Amino acid sequence: PIELVAAYSAFATLGVAVKPQYIARIEDRAGRTIWTAEPKPPELAIDPRVAFIVRDMMREAVDRGTGAWVRRLVDVRVPVAGKTGTTNDNTDVWFVGMTPELVAGVWLGFDRPRPIAQGAGGGTYAAPIFGQMIAKYYEGRAVGTWAPPAGLISAELDRATGMLADAFTPPERRYVEYFLEGTEPPE
């Protein structure tokens, strides 16, 4: 789970890889810091534009897909993105998600693999736990935003056709999609 959360952090940070650090500092009995971890220099793992697009797709998983339990539990003012996962034999379920301030993961399974339950899935078991954690975290806290980096083109599309929305596309079918310059749909 730690490696999975670290990998997904690159989408949350617009491409910067975050290495897990298990110990930030060591204090003596008096509370004096006797050792502090050296900060690791950030590394760009993927193009920030690609990271934004992938994260935006993961928002869809929370808003309309298998991670919808998260959106039911987290205030709509909080941007959330994530991905569910379930092994074929239902021995592991997980959800890795992010907000502008946090990246976290929830894994459920047994030390000795065996099915959790008939029909167990990351969206029905792990995503609600993540949603509860995030809802609690944001009680009374300010919420950040996600803004697209330079070099992306946005287009309003029609959910039913996947084509550009036009004057006849009803509002409930319209949504915004982002594209690398030169890959956007034609007019």
Image (tube, rainbow, N blue to C red):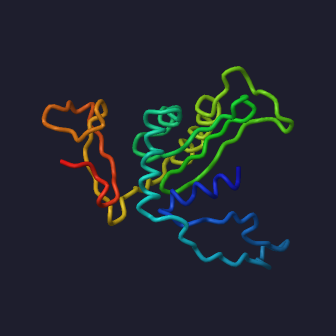
Q: Residue 170 at x, y = what percent?
A: 20, 30
In this view, the residue in front, 155 or 133, is 155
Question: Left or right: where does residue 83 sit relative to residue 63?
Answer: right
**Residue positioned most to the top:** 118
Residue 137 drawn at (x, y percent): 56, 48
Q: Which residue is the extreme one toward the left?
A: 167
- Residue drawn at x 55%, y 60% is 10
Question: Residue 78 location, x and y as percent?
Answer: 44, 46
- Please tell me which residue lies in front, 70 or 74: 70
55, above or below 40, in the image: above
How many numbered discs, if any?
0
In the rendered image, residue 128, in percent from the top left (x then y), is placed at 59, 34
Left or right for 71, reference 36: left
Vertical position of residue 93 compared to residue 35: above or below: above
Apparent side of residue 59 relative to residue 28 in the rendered image (left or right): left
Q: What residue is shown at x 53% (from left), y 35% (from top)?
A: 67
Of 20 and 185, nearer the camera is 185
Place residue 129 in its image quadrant.
top right
Residue 38 lies in quadrant: bottom right
Which residue occupies 53% across, 70% down? 44
